Amino acid sequence: MNEQSPQKWGLFIMIKVERYKLFFNSKDFEKIYNQSISEIIKQTHGPYESFFKEVVLISLSKNHCFILFENDNPIGYEIVKIKNKKIEGGFTFILPEHRGKKYSFLLREKMFDLLKTEIDEFSTFIKNSNVISIENAKKTAEIFNFNLHVSDSIITPDGVNTNIKKYTIFPK
C-alpha cells in the first residue's frame, strides 16, 4: 500500500452520479466537459461543431447528461441523445487518472437505471481501434441481460466507413 493510499489514512472515497440540472451542477459539467473536447474530436466521426450542436446542446436541454463525481469533484460524464425512445448517440468521458477503475461502467449502469422508462434501445458508434469501449459494450449487454447487435460498416455522407461499427443494445 503506498503512502498516499486513502485506505492507509482511513479516508473514504465517495462516488456518485448525478443527472445534469441547469444551475445545480451545470458548472461541474462545464468543468469536466472542457477537459474532454480534445478526446471528443479524436473519438467521434464528423466535425466537433456538429457533435456539439446535434448531441451536446440537445442532450443538456433535455437533462440527458450524467456527471460522475469522486467526493465533490467531477471526474467524468455520459451524455446521450435520445430520439423516439432510442439512444442514438452520445459520449462517455472519464479523466485519464481515473480510468481503469470501472467508473465508466458505473456511470452507464446509473444512466440505464435513470433512463429505463425513457428508452427502448441504446446505440453507439465505436471506432474499431477503441478496444476498451467495444469490450464495455459487450459487458453491458451481458450484465443487463440485453441483446447486442453489431453492424459491419457504417454508411456516412462520405461513403461506407469500415473503421467504425454501430453497437445496439436492447432488451431481450
Image (spheres, rainbow, N blue to C red):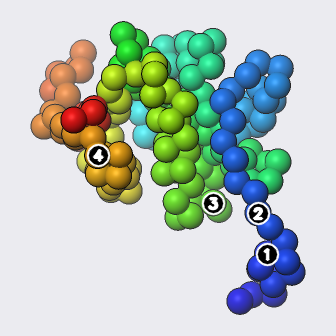
Mark 3–mark 1 distance (CA, rounded to whole Å)? 14 Å
**Going from the N terminus, do you reach mark 4 or mark 2 first?**
2
Number of marks in the rendered image: 4
Residue position marked by numbered label 2 in the rendering = 13
Query: What residue is shown at x 83% (from left), y 20% (from top)?
Result: 23
Q: Label 4 is placed on what type of residue? A: Asn
Q: Label 1 is placed on what type of residue? A: Pro
The residue carrying pointer 4 sits among few (fewer than 14), some (14 to 19) or many (20 or more) residues within 10 Å by Cα, namely few
Is 22 placed left or right of 160 in the picture? right
Vertical relation: 20 (above or below) 126: above
> Where in the figure is residue 11, as x and y percent of width and height?
84, 72
**Going from the N terminus, do you reach mark 4 or mark 3 first?**
3
Q: Secondary structure at mark 3?
A: helix
Q: Are marks 1 and 2 in contact (CB under 8 Å)?
A: yes
Q: Secondary structure at mark 1?
A: loop
The mark lying in front, picked from 4 and 1, is 4
Query: What residue is shown at x 79% (from left), y 75% (from top)?
Result: 6
The mark lying in front, picked from 3 and 1, is 1
Query: What residue is shown at x 48% (from left), y 51% (from top)?
Result: 105
Vertical relation: 160 (above or below) 100: above
Mark 1–mark 2 distance (CA, rounded to whole Å)? 8 Å
Q: Are marks 4 and 3 in contact (CB under 8 Å)?
A: no
Say if residue 38 shows up in the picture: no
Of residues 85 and 159, the one drawn nearer to the viewer in this rendering: 85
Of residues 133 and 67, the one drawn nearer to the viewer in this rendering: 67
Q: Classify the position of the C terminus by image quarter.
A: top left
Residue position marked by numbered label 4 in the rendering = 145
Mark 4–mark 2 distance (CA, rounded to whole Å)? 30 Å
Say if residue 172 shows up in the picture: yes
The residue carrying pointer 2 sits among few (fewer than 14), some (14 to 19) or many (20 or more) residues within 10 Å by Cα, namely few
Q: Label 3 is placed on what type of residue? A: His
Residue position marked by numbered label 1 in the rendering = 6
